[in-house]
Structure formats: C-alpha cells, structure tokens
Image (cartoon, helix red, strand yellow):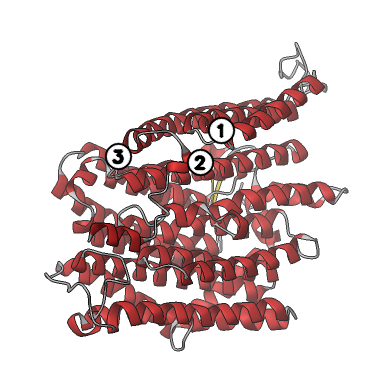
Amino acid sequence: MNVLLAITAGVLFGGGLFMMLRRSLVRVLIGLLMISNAVNLIIFTAGRLVPARPPLISAGESALQPPYADPVPQALILTAIVISFGVTAFAIVLMQQTYRSLGNADMNEMRSTDTPVEDEEEAAS
Amino acid sequence: MNAWSIAPIGLALAWGIMGLIFWQRIRLLRWLGVLGSTSFVALSIALLTMVQKEKFLILQVGAWRAPFGITIAIDLLGALMVTMTSVLAWFIALYSLTEIDESQVRYGFYPLFFLLLMGVFGAFTTGDLFNLYVWFEVMLMASFVLMALGGYRAQLEGATKYVLLNLIGSTFFLIAAGLTYSLTGTLNMADLAVQIREIDNPSLPLVLSALFLIAFGIKAAIFPLFFWLPASYHTPPVAVTALFSGLLTKVGVYAMVRVFTLIFPFNGTILQPILLVLAGFTMVTGVLGAAAQWDLRRLLSFHIISQIGYLIMGLGLFTPLALAGTIFFTLHVVIAKAALFLVSGMIQRLTGTFNLKSLGNLAQTQPGMALLFAFPALSLAGLPPFSGFFAKLILVRAGLEAQQGAIVAVSLVVSLLTLFSMSKIWQEAFWKPARREGKGILPVHMWGAVGGIVVVGVLLGLFANPIMTLSLQAAEQLLQPSMYIQMVLGGQP
C-alpha cells in the first residue's frame, strides 16, 4: 500500500510539473491542483498507514500502542485541503479575468508586465 | 502565560471585521485605516517594552501544554518586526487616503489591508511550524487580492504570475512541514529544536532544511527564485507596492532566520556556503537588473531583490554580529524602500508617468520632493550618516570577522552600483530638462506620510546605537535558543 501511494504521489508530481510547464493557463492550474494533491498524499503516507485500527487508547493504558496511524498528519491535510480549495477558487476567478482582458489563455501572450516603458510611451505619442 | 502575545493578531482581525461591517462607507473606511494602524503602533510599542522586561511573551492557545497545542510566542525579534510592520502600515494608511481610489476601496481594500497585516503579525509571532504555514497563506491570500485590485490588464497578468509562483512556494513549505512532522512527531518550534538535535543521521535534517530554503527562498525572492517579484510588484497602486516591499519578502526572510537559527542551525554544514553564494548572486542580479530599467517602480523592485541579498548574507555568516546586522538591515531597508516607493508614487501623481526618460527637472519644480527622495536614496546606497551606512558597516565587519572576504567584496561593489542606480534616478528625474512638466498640488497628508517615513528613516540612522543594541540582544536570543525552548516547553505551570 505504501509503495502504491508513493508511486501515485510521484506520478501526480510528475504530471503536475508537466502541466505547469504548458502555456495554457487552464493546464497550469490543473498542474497546480495535481501537485497540491500529491503533497497531501505524501503527508498522509508519512503519517503511516494502518488499516482498521482507530487511534484510540484502550482501557488501562496511557498511550497509543503501535501499530497505529498518526491522526495529526490527517488533520494537517484537512487544513491544507481547505486552504488549497480557497486558493484554487481565487486562482480560477483570477485566470478567468485575465483570460477576459487578454483574449486568450496563452502564457506567452502575457507580456504587459514585461513591456519596456519606452515602447509604451512611443506608442502613445 | 501571557495573553498579550496574541493581541496583534486579534486586533488586526477586529479591524478587518470592522472594515467588512462598513463595507461601503468610503470616507469612514479611509479613516478607519488610519485609526486602526495607529492602534497597531501603540500596541506594538507596548509589546516591545514588555518584551524587553520579560524577554518572552508566551501564550499556549486553549491552555494546551506546549508540544501539543499551538504556541504564540513573541521574543525580541518578533516584537521588533511587529513594531516595524505597524509603523510602516501607519504611513501607508495615511498615504492611501487619496492614493487608493474609490472603486478600490469599494472592492475591499481596507478589510484586505487589515487581514494582510493579521497574516504578517501571525507569522511574526507564532511558535508553531504548521501555524506559520497557515499565516503565510492568510497573508498570501490577502496579497493576491490586493495585487489584482483594480483589474487593469497588467495587474491581472502580474497577479497571475505572482499567484502561481507563490503557490508553488507554499507547496514546498507544506511538504517540508509534513516531512518534519513525520521525522520528529512534533510541530512546536521549541520542541522541534530539541528533537532535531537528537537525530543521529545528519543528512535528514539537511534535506529538510534544503526544502525550507526553497520554500522561504521563493517568498523572500532570493537569487534563482525571485522572478515573480519584478514581474508583478510594479503593477498594483504604489501604496500597495510599498506595503508589499516592506512586508512580504521580509516575512520570508524572517521565517528563514527563525527556522535556520532555532530548528535547523546550519553552521558548519554545506548549507552555509550555499547561502552565502546565493546571497552574493541575489545582490548582484538585483542591482544589475535595476541598472537596465527605465521605469521607476520596476527599478526600485529590482533593488528589493538586491537588498534581500544583504539580509541573507547576515544569516549566512551566522555570528551574533551578523544576525544583528540582518535585523538592523531589515528595519532600515523596509523604511527606506517604502519611502522611495511612496516618492515614486508622488512623482507619478504629479507628472502622470513612471518613465525616467520623460521625467525631469523635478529638483527645480519640486525641491521638497527632491529632498524626500535624496535621504532614503542615499540611505539605501549606504552613505553616512544614514541608517544604511550603519547596517552595511555591521554586515561588512561581521563578514571580515568571519573571514568571508568574497561576500564582503561583493556587498561593497553592489553598494557602489546601488549608488550608481540612485544617481541615475536623480540625474534623470530631478536634474535633466523635463520632457513633461509636472503640474498640480499634492494633498497635504501625502506630503505628511512621505515626510514622516523619511524622518523615521533618518532617525533610524541618528539613533543607530540604541537600535543596534536591541538588534544585538535579539540576535543573542536567536543564537542561544535554550532559553526560548525552556520558556515555551517548561516555563509555565
């Protein structure tokens, strides 16, 4: 199970990176989503995978008996998922607005921030 | 147990909510901004005096004992950073009274301004690694919206680049925090400091610190990771740029200082020379990038990067004097940089352009503005008697003491290039005959804000000694984490 999850995370990372290197804004966004899910999987796996053993301290003991799956990383992932949900929602809206003002979704066309000012001035005059 | 340590976060949240309640009351909101920032300044000065007396203000949230709950802890470094943030925010709020136009206020500039400050305060005061990640996200989320506020095409494009690269940075931070937990079983910074030192295999902490270096390096805009900054910082209104230049990258540097002194002390490892090399490259690429620019704001944006190099240099040297230099340099550069950005905003207000080629003759038509530009510009270049001189002097001395001649030489050359860059602005905008004459009168509070922040910068130079003493104390605290650890883990009932 560990190996399977590790491979899944690796594939997600690779795929996400590949998508992020594309020029289309939508693909970049999908890539970002894949990477953030890969991170969540890594943390989930790092908290150990133990099926069918709830992290409850049984009667008469003062600490969890191994093997158990650590619940804290799972709580961290929950927080991370909520944050990435909010951030992604904002990124989608931002990209839609960019698309509207730009007329297409090609990253190579996003040059308004890099145009030297003198060109602008000369174009205006 | 000291509940005051959570006060900056709480106060910023309260003002943010006030901003939401009075969502459409434009005039009221503008003055709420000033009033709110005044309260931050008062609170932060109170905190600073408290920290000087008690050394640490520590709150265990929800009364959960230290390694289990979230700790909010302010030490001297945190208090200094909070104070600097509040002072900067006050001047920005004053400047924003007219700089931020009505539609931007209507779209929530002021609530976002306060929430951004909440994120920054949170990052400066938290004692928990994952909590630091959450505050980073709060800060980033507010900054994303502030960056895009107004919706001009360049702004949207700049914001897209900014958002994407910063999200990648956050991803790295999250991996690093998650793996740190799986290695040690704790997220409390003080407890982490204890646990990491007990790990036998030195390569595991080294890998983690490299991950943290990338994560914070993206936020702090150090050498190979800074490309989002010049692509985006010149697009929002100049008040927002000044605020970002003072806060966002500095939070990245702060996180580096905190994590690399408390949790992963890297002296003696391979990371130390790497950091020094990165510092040198950051300085050089920043200043050379600036040399090629003719847009005032983009030129200044590149200088942000160059100055980050000095901050990293102090951290890389890793001596008490060098760290004190980093802290003092942070205070200096935040004030000087914000002042320069605000002056550039005044110039644009007056003449309608940021283009150095069409500006000119301002020294004659606006002597007051020329003066306001000259002080922070000379300070940034590191001329005595301004704060930049002392900041660089300390770093150079620390570098020589640590026998790192190369980085000292680089820093001095970059200093000279900075002076060249500043004199280019002076020559182009203030001395040569103008292609486009400025007209109109600027509102008085704009003059007040810029004048005030310049005065603060000058005072920082004139009273360099007491501030340096504070920085040295803060650096001592950082390099002897045992007291912090003890206070967080066992200092309270």
User: Quick one: label 3 or label 2, which is nearer the N terminus?
Assistant: 3
Whether B448 is drawn above or below A50: the answer is below
The residue positioned farthest toward the left in the image shown? B440
Q: Quadrant of residue B372?
A: bottom left
Quick check: A116 left or right of A121?
A: right
Whether A34 is drawn above or below B401: the answer is above
Whole-number angstrom distance, CA of label 3 to CA of label 1: 31 Å
Q: Are marks 3 and 1 in contact (CB under 8 Å)?
A: no
Amino acid residing under circle 1 = Leu
Chain under numbered label 1? A
The answer to whether dots 3 and 2 both sit on one chain is yes
Q: Residue at x 76, y 40 (%)?
A: B184
Q: Position of residue B73 (x, y in %)?
A: 55, 52
The residue positioned farthest toward the bottom in the image shown? B384
Judged from the image, the secondary structure of the residue bearing numbered disc 3 is helix
Identify residue for label 1. Answer: A32
Q: Quadrant of residue B429?
A: bottom left
Circle 2 Cα neighbour tier, 10 Å, few/some/many (<14 / 14–19 / ≥20): some
Amino acid residing under circle 3 = Ile
Circle 3 Cα neighbour tier, 10 Å, few/some/many (<14 / 14–19 / ≥20): some
Whether B325 is drawn above or below B45: the answer is below
The answer to whether dots 2 and 1 both sit on one chain is no
Judged from the image, the secondary structure of the residue bearing numbered disc 2 is helix
Identify residue for label 2. Answer: B164
Q: Tell me, for residue B17, which label it has, or none.
A: 3
- Can residue B146 be seen here? no
Q: Residue at x 46, y 57 (%)?
A: B230
Quick check: B439 left or right of B384?
A: left
